[in-house]
Amino acid sequence: MNKYIFLIVFSMTTALVIAQESKYYFGISYGKSFPIGDFAAGDITNSDAGFAESGSKLDFYMGSVLSERVIFTLTFRYQNFDTDIHELVKSLEATNQGIILNGNSDAWKIHSLLAGIEYKLNIGRKFSLYPRIGLGPMLVSNPEFSITDTDENTNTGVNRSSETGFGLGYEFGIGFKRDLGKSFCLMPTFTFSGGFVTISDVDTTVDNRSITSNYQPKIITFNLGLSLAYKF
């Protein structure tokens, strides 16, 4: 009986100590996102080509210390990528000799909510390394674009509608933390992120012939971020 009482008291004391030592942080991060693979491809013959250019990334995030080395994280992320419409125009002009095309396009817009885990590795007294991974829902809006022939007597042209799809987003990489006094810290990150998304009912018109189909963009990006976090 004494053994069980000791275990109960020990467990309660440990839980109390952990609760007293628990810490939280909240921060904001801004940086660059670089599309990779098919998402960045500019080949008109590649049906998965995203024609995405380098874009920006904005994160609002929080962390909660679960143990001495493990931290739970929650990140809301917005990414924006312009479309390389000029590369698409050049590709179409190359396959349609003798025509001159004009192109206009919106941007890719990606919203993610990622829950994840960081593992703390101390490097010195004020500097730490954090391998990290995260998963969560993702919303993706493909860019609307329009390509038209400058000759009004021809029907050459391509148009695609912008729709929004839902799927699963992910992230993995590393972060660094440098304490700035007792309440603030600097947290640069280097991560890869992407998602598995289906965008339904995308209308595509080519030379006045229209089709409606589902689109599954292959989204992969490399991200650089610099953030400032407040600890409490």
Image (spheres, grey):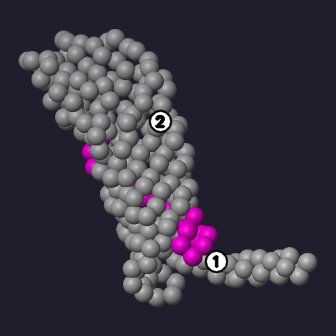
Residue 36, image x, y percentages: 29, 44
At x 83%, y 82%, the residue is 6
Quarter that holds the C terminus: bottom right
As drawn, is 114 to the left or to the right of 50? Answer: right
Disc 2 residue type (three-letter) = Val
In the image, the segment drawn in magenta is 52-72
Task: Report if residue 120 is visible in the image.
Answer: yes
Given residues 151 and 4, the one toward you in this image is 4
Residue 123, image x, y percentages: 39, 80
- Residue 26 against residue 94 in the figure, above or below: below
Quick one: SS at disc 2?
Answer: strand
The dot on residue 197 is: 2
The dot on residue 22 is: 1
Main SS, magenta residues: strand
Residue 220, image x, y percentages: 36, 44
Label 1 Cα neighbours within 10 Å, binned few <14 / some 14-19 / many ≥20 = some
- Residue 20 against residue 49 in the figure, above or below: below
Whole-angstrom CA distance, mark 2 to mark 1, is: 36 Å
